[in-house]
Image (tube, rainbow, N blue to C red):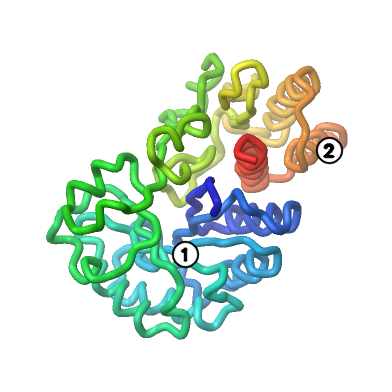
Amino acid sequence: MSTYFPIFRGKQFELIAIREFARARPGGTIVHPIIEPVRDPSGNTGLARTITSLEEHGFRYTVIVNPAKGDLADRGDAPAVIVESIDASDATIEHLCFGVSLRAGGNSDDAIDAIRGSSLSDAPLNLIYDKPTAGPRDLGELRQQGIWLHVAEAKSDVRSLNAFPRSFSCVQLDRTFKRLPRNTAYVDKAPSVFCNAHLYFEEDGFVGISDFLTIGDDYSEGGGLPLALVIHLTYQDPADQLIYIRHFCSTSNEDQSDPGGKFLEAVSKLVAFIDDEGLDNPALEQFRAYHREQRFPGLGVVKKLSMQNHLYVMDDALS
């Protein structure tokens, strides 16, 4: 079974990150993406293309059918719309898992009804414990469902509901990336430990670990150009096996002009570091290429590469 369950909001570059990673490391047995669609998939082929890529390259994956964020968060028909889109895709029960976001007021009954009406209803069901924390009254028909995995910050979150077998399997959800209110706050921020759960999760009784990569669980639709451009980079230290994060920042941060120049300032620092440390994977090679060509690919691509690097780091650390 997979041991790393990264949670993606289904924005364009997050879905591209998944597809490219699946192509780069086919037959993956470590990484199991959890996708929370934040766009209506009936009018957007991004989710369907991502499912096709994951199926073709042998990955198991989860699609949340009652998203808590984005365009579908407050729509009562969201589970039906998402499940219909999955039914029309290349999804198979060998690879697909349905996901239900378990949170206070999270319309889990609508999610279960939609899943039961699916041609893929035999696919495993995973619960992702979100905020605000669900209570027993939010379970509804979930009490009668066989749950494969509980993705929660602590096993006590599952036990508090007193509704599931004592032998439940739990994935440890870490909200490890703490987004600061302004990018300029990262300029003098020291490297820090991003993750140690990969070393201890089995000892703690978990079957895997989960996080929100280098984006964090705070959701936003995007904003204007930042004063400082920051590239968030995770890496594993071979000495202690911990996973650290560094923040490579631009230096000309007086105003919002010239994002391309800011990127080149930040990426030059990143490339110097990864060269000194001997770090390498396809995402880092792409950063090296942009530095070599003195080319700015856009903020979306920078975030995509940061996420992809983290996927490679976790895949290697857990292999």
On screen, residue 109 versus residue 242, left or right, reads left
Name the one closer to the observer, 14 or 311. Answer: 311
Mark 1 surroundings: few (<14), some (14-19) or many (≥20) residues within 10 A: many
* Residue 169 to residue 114: above or below: above
Mark 2 surroundings: few (<14), some (14-19) or many (≥20) residues within 10 A: few
Under tag 2, what secondary structure?
Answer: helix
Name the one closer to the observer, 93 or 48. Answer: 93
**Residue at 34% of width from left, 63% of height from top?**
147
Residue 169 seen in render? yes
The residue where tag 2 is placed is 289
Say whether disc 1 or disc 2 marks the residue closer to the N-terminus: 1
Residue 287: where, in percent of width, then height?
Answer: 76, 36
| Kind of residue at badge 2 | Ala
| Kind of residue at badge 1 | Val
* Residues at marks 1 and 2, CA–CA distance in whole angstroms: 33 Å
* Quadrant in the picture for the C terminus: top right
Residue 199: where, in percent of width, then height?
Answer: 52, 30
Name the one closer to the observer, 307 or 166. Answer: 166
Under tag 1, what secondary structure?
Answer: strand
Q: Which mark is residue 63?
A: 1
Q: Residue furthest right?
A: 293
**Residue at 32% of width from left, 53% of height from top?**
168
Residue 170: where, in percent of width, then height?
Answer: 37, 48
- The number of discs equals 2
* Quadrant of the image occupied by residue 153: top left
* Residue 187 to residue 140: above or below: above
**Residue at 69% of width from left, 32% of height from top?**
263
On screen, residue 236 versus residue 181, left or right, reads right
Residue 159: where, in percent of width, then height?
Answer: 21, 47
